[in-house]
Image (spheres, rainbow, N blue to C red):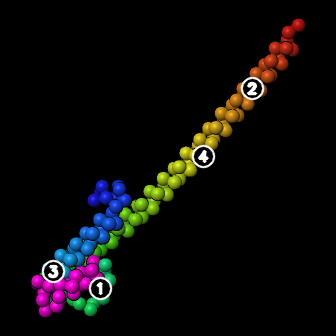
């Protein structure tokens, strides 16, 4: 997971994990609560809606084991959404920090160039003044 975040491929990873979980849960709830879920497709639909924390209520588990699976799916859905939100926010913040760092580096480089130019000018003026002083003290 950390490698996916670092390489900015976390969205496809989360989408794939969510899809795999929805399909797996769809088969599972169809097997444990066939009266509530009349097809695997209906179970997958319910799992997607539950993972997305939408909860339309058009299909619901009524058996104890179906509700246990529902609770687990809700926890996974909230966790995935929270992680996705945190990851996207982190990507925006790191992008902004990188841009700010680049702007600061450019500003610093320009400032250093300006200081070098001023030092060269001051050095030239100082040499000119020393030259005048040397000329003024010579007989």
- Distance from label 3 to label 4 (Cα)? 59 Å
Mark positioned earlier in the residue sequence (3 or 4): 3
Residue at 44% x, 56% y is 94
Circles 4 and 1: CB atoms closer than 8 Å? no
Q: Is residue 126 visible?
A: yes
Q: In this view, which residue lies farthest toward the top?
A: 139
Q: Nearer the viewer, mark 3 or mark 2?
A: 3
Q: Nearer the viewer, mark 1 or mark 3?
A: 3
Q: Which residue is mark 1?
A: 55
Q: Give the vertical position of 14 relative to 47 (above or below).
A: above
Circles 3 and 2: CB atoms closer than 8 Å? no
Q: Which residue is mark 3?
A: 27
Classify mark 1: helix, strand or loop.
Answer: loop
Mark positioned earlier in the residue sequence (2 or 4): 4
Residue at 80% x, 22% y is 129
Would residue 120 appear left or right of 65 to someone viewing this image?
Answer: right
Question: Few, some or many C-alpha atoms within 10 Å of disc 2 (few <14, some 14-19, many ≥20)?
Answer: few
Quarter of the image holding residue 22? bottom left
* Extent of the magenta region: 30-51
Magenta span main SS: helix
Quarter containing the C terminus: top right
- Name the disc covering residue 107, or none: 4
Please say whether residue 101 is one of the residues in the magenta stretch. no
Classify mark 4: helix, strand or loop.
Answer: helix
Mark positioned earlier in the residue sequence (4 or 1): 1
- Name the disc covering residue 124, or none: 2
């Amino acid at each position: 997971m950390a490698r996916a975040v670092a390489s900015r491929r976390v969205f496809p990873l989360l989408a794939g994990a969510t899809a795999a979980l929805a399909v797996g849960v769809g088969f599972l709830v169809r097997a444990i609560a066939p009266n509530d879920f009349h097809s695997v497709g209906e179970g997958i639909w319910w799992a997607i809606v539950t993972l997305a924390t939408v909860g339309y209520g058009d299909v619901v588990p009524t058996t104890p084991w179906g509700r246990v699976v529902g609770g687990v799916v809700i926890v996974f859905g909230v966790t995935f959404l929270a992680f996705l939100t945190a990851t996207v926010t982190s990507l925006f913040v790191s992008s902004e920090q990188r841009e700010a760092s680049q702007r600061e580096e450019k500003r610093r480089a320009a400032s250093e160039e300006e200081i070098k130019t001023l030092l060269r000018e001051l050095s030239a003026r100082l040499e000119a003044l020393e030259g005048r002083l040397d000329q003024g003290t010579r007989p």
